[in-house]
Image (cartoon, rainbow, N blue to C red):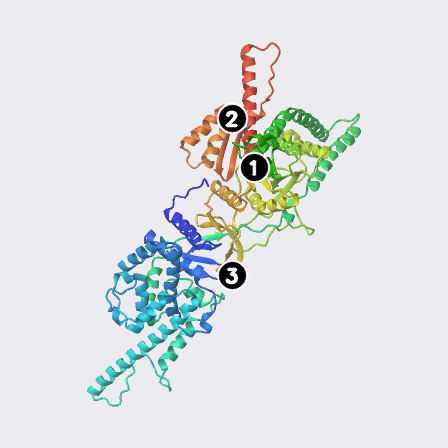
Amino acid sequence: MCISDKNPMTIQYEIKSQLAKLLATEDLVVEHKKVETASFNVVSRVLTLPMWENTSEQVVDMLVSHEVGHALYTPSDEWYKEYKINPNVVNVVEDARIEKLMKRRYDGITKTFYKGYTELHNQDFFQVKKKDITKLTLADRINLFYKIGSHYRISFTDYEQTLVDRVGSCETFQDVLEVSKLIYQYCLDEIEKKKQELETEQDSEFEMEGNQDGQGSGSGFDEGEDGEGSSEDAESLFEEESSDDDNGESQEAKSLGGGMGTGETDSMVETAESLEQSIKNLANMNGLENHYLELPNVDTDQIIIDNEVIHGLCDAHFADIRKDFEEKSKIAAGLERDWSLYSLEEGIKAMTEADAEFLKFKKEAQKEVNYLVKEFEMKKSAGAYARATTSRTGILDTSKLHTYKYNEDLFKKVSIVPDGKNHGLIFVLDWSGSMSREMLDTIKQLYNLIWFCNKVQIPFEVYAFTENFPNVNEEGYTKESYEPRVGLFKVRPGFSLMNIFTSKVRGKNLEKQLINFFRIATSFRNYNSHRLVPHGLSLSGTPLNESIVALHKIIPQFRKENDIEKVNCVILTDGEAYQLNYHKEIQRSWEDEPYMGERSIDTSCFLRNRKTGKTYKTGDNWTTFTPVLLQDLRDTYPDVNFVGIRIMPPRELSTFLRINCDDYNSPEVEKHRLNWKKTKSVAIKECGYHVYFGLSSAALANDSEFEVDEGATKAQIKRAFTKSLTAKKMNKKILNEFVTMIA
């Protein structure tokens, strides 16, 4: 991509997202949000990470690796319904297991965990530097042993050591539950023992004070009638902690899959509680909330205007002009002519001139079209030859038998040439107001490619995007192409794609359709011929981004309908598009219920593609957003070529280069400038499009034929010849690059 982001923390977040996905090796959705602790939804496979700050890369890498370990290895079974074990204890053992498995899977992660935990220990995240470790519970000591054991000499009894070893040997989550049950019971016994010791000490103090009636009540642990109040209290605490939340996400998903410790306080594992609280303090809770947005699944049936409908309007419109002119001419015979008749005359004149210009252009364009065909066939043949293989048949070649004494190659050979791929082209034409001056030249380039497709029998579809076509339902309301939902980008209601040309229409019918739009295109440069534009086909805004969204549905449909292996998508535009807003639930203070609103994208917005598993920073302006959408489209369809063609006046070259090049002051930009001077064209690669062609409208508008007036001077002849060669050189260069790409 040609987009860079100078914000180091943003870059870090996205790098860590990619790290998580690489470690997980699965279609994992990673979100960095304004939350205190990490969490993993085992159903949606969404890993939510805090926006950690004020810490090192090593710590962040360690935390990410730890959470990915939970995502990979911690199951979603509701274990707590069967096993009455404090989740804090299970989490300690599960942490040891998943980190062991991550280290086994990725050798380099061992250093990551060591350096990360060392830094956390040095900052006393476990809060043990002022404590006597020997007085901690077994669960606490096991937690420290497997996280920072290299920094402490932690002692265990013989029986405790057997449990520690069992923790280290856990391979499955079932193993974790079995050993956790033993550790949990041991911790209960520890707590009960300490409680009894405390009660004995208190009784002794009361006896010394002569208070015989005192029963001692300061421990906080009240025994039941059966004398096992400690276990019952712990089980009660467990039941509170293991209840499901409102979203149906189990405690396991929250405690085991989402965080280094637990969400509930419990003295049984104080170190886990301290660690979690310390890590919470690393999270940035004051910055912008990241918004992860997705493209809507649009219904193309509601967006695409059928080819027959478009040209039915055109044919009717031009027929009406002729009819009105004939009728008003008869009425005006012998009478004073009115202004409407003059307007109709201008319309008829414009149609006649446009038709003549079309026929002339068609004749002249055949040279370039034939050049395209020749280059395409040559490159196809060269490609097939390069892929050809030769194999022996097992049949003796009798012509080589006499060489048997010194030659082992006595068998006939056969060359296998693989079949070429079926090609198809999709064209998207910018039908916006900013294209008015360049529309005719753009149409001419489009027609060259259409004639090329016809000659080599390549299926094609041509769409023009607009917001002016009256695309309404039976009730008269604008057709909705998708169901709005929070977290989706918004497609403007008036957006349509007019199917102006298709390979399904051939021969005279196709030529008639080409003439229709040639007439319309010529009218944009001549304001006196505005009558040639049918209702709904006038130039509009620039829903280019909406068109890119629609291509996610159009490409697979086009491929399926035509049985195509290789699709090429060409977008002819001036490059300036509307920015897409996104749907957001908005709550007003004076209203009881929120409503579905919309917001403009900003630096906190990301485009997320669940199909590819990739996330893209959108940026906050139109110059960066369209390339992001194109990159997402390329990643979704990696076998499709995406080509941009922009016809522009020479004065816009600097803007074109500034927008589409990473570094405006780089030597590469200077090369583009020099090439522009020579060929009046430029080709920028890997900037949203695979290649983005910039063509000089001034050069294209010039007649490429070598024509001079009679009696011309040598200097005039030279200039005309140079002008002709330059135009041909530009066209051939661009056409050659285009053909090379699709062949």
Location of residue 407 in the rendering, given as x and y in whole percent from the top left corner: 53, 32
Please, is residue 702 above or below residue 143 in the view? above
Q: Secondary structure at mark 3?
A: loop
Q: Which residue is mark 1?
A: 389
Q: Which residue is mark 2?
A: 680
Left or right for 400, reference 46: right
Q: Are marks 1 and 3 in contact (CB under 8 Å)?
A: no
Give the quarter of the image for residue 404: top right
- The three-letter code of the residue at mark 2 reads Lys
Q: Are marks 3 and 2 in contact (CB under 8 Å)?
A: no
Left or right for 518, reference 613: right
Give the mark nearer the N terminus: 1 vs 3. 1
Q: Nearer the viewer, mark 1 or mark 2?
A: 1
Cα separation between marks 1 and 3: 73 Å
Give the quarter of the image for residue 165: bottom left
Residue 262 visible at all: no
Q: Which residue is mark 3?
A: 591
Q: Nearer the viewer, mark 1 or mark 3?
A: 1
